[in-house]
Image (tube, rainbow, N blue to C red):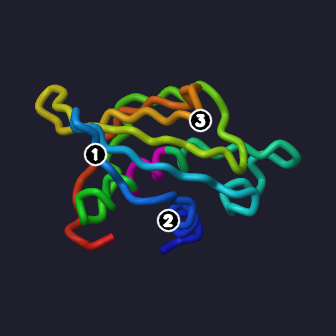
Amino acid sequence: MNKILLGIAAAKRGGAATDAGGTLEGRYCFGDTFTGFAGHFPGHPILPAIVEILTVVSLVSEHTGCRQHLIAVEDAKFLNPVLPNQEILVRCRQRSVKGKLLYDAELTVGETITATLLIELSSTGEVP
């Protein structure tokens, strides 16, 4: 497993949960020593967009008990930066779009939406 994926696993706060409406939730907090902040950007670190996407992949993998592989990013909006030591709430749910099973995700820090994503995943069959 690479440093980014190990860092995402280390940033996890508690287990994945599903609310009454079927939305999957997880919390993450990336410390200022997280490798993803290195060089992004010197003196003003922000969480890279790919890390936000991979965090959703990690959450779904944990929930399903099977490692997921990112197939496509159908839509992505990065609305506000995520800074070191901010707790992120990741919420996602499955939905079908044109016959594809996709994950609709929203990442927030406090009451602020940081990103919205629509991604396609595929199970690798491996345990995460």
| Chain part drawn in magenta | 53-58
Tell me the kind of residue under disc 1: Thr
The tag on residue 85 is none
Left or right of residue 128: residue 5: right
Left or right of residue 57: residue 81: right
* Camera-side mark, 2 or 1: 1
User: Which residue is disc 1 drawn over?
Assistant: 18
Tell me the kind of residue under disc 3: Val
Q: Assign the C terminus to one quadrant of the image.
A: bottom left
Q: Nearer the viewer, residue 13 or 41?
A: 13
Q: Are marks 2 and 1 in contact (CB under 8 Å)?
A: no
Q: Residue at x 25, y 65 (%)?
A: 65
Image x and y of residue 42, in percent: 85, 49
User: Which residue is disc 2 drawn over?
Assistant: 9
The tag on residue 109 is 3
Element marked by disc 1: strand
Element marked by disc 3: strand
Vertical order, 43 against 118 (above or below)? below
CA–CA distance in space, label 2 to label 1: 19 Å
Q: Quadrant of residue 72?
A: top left
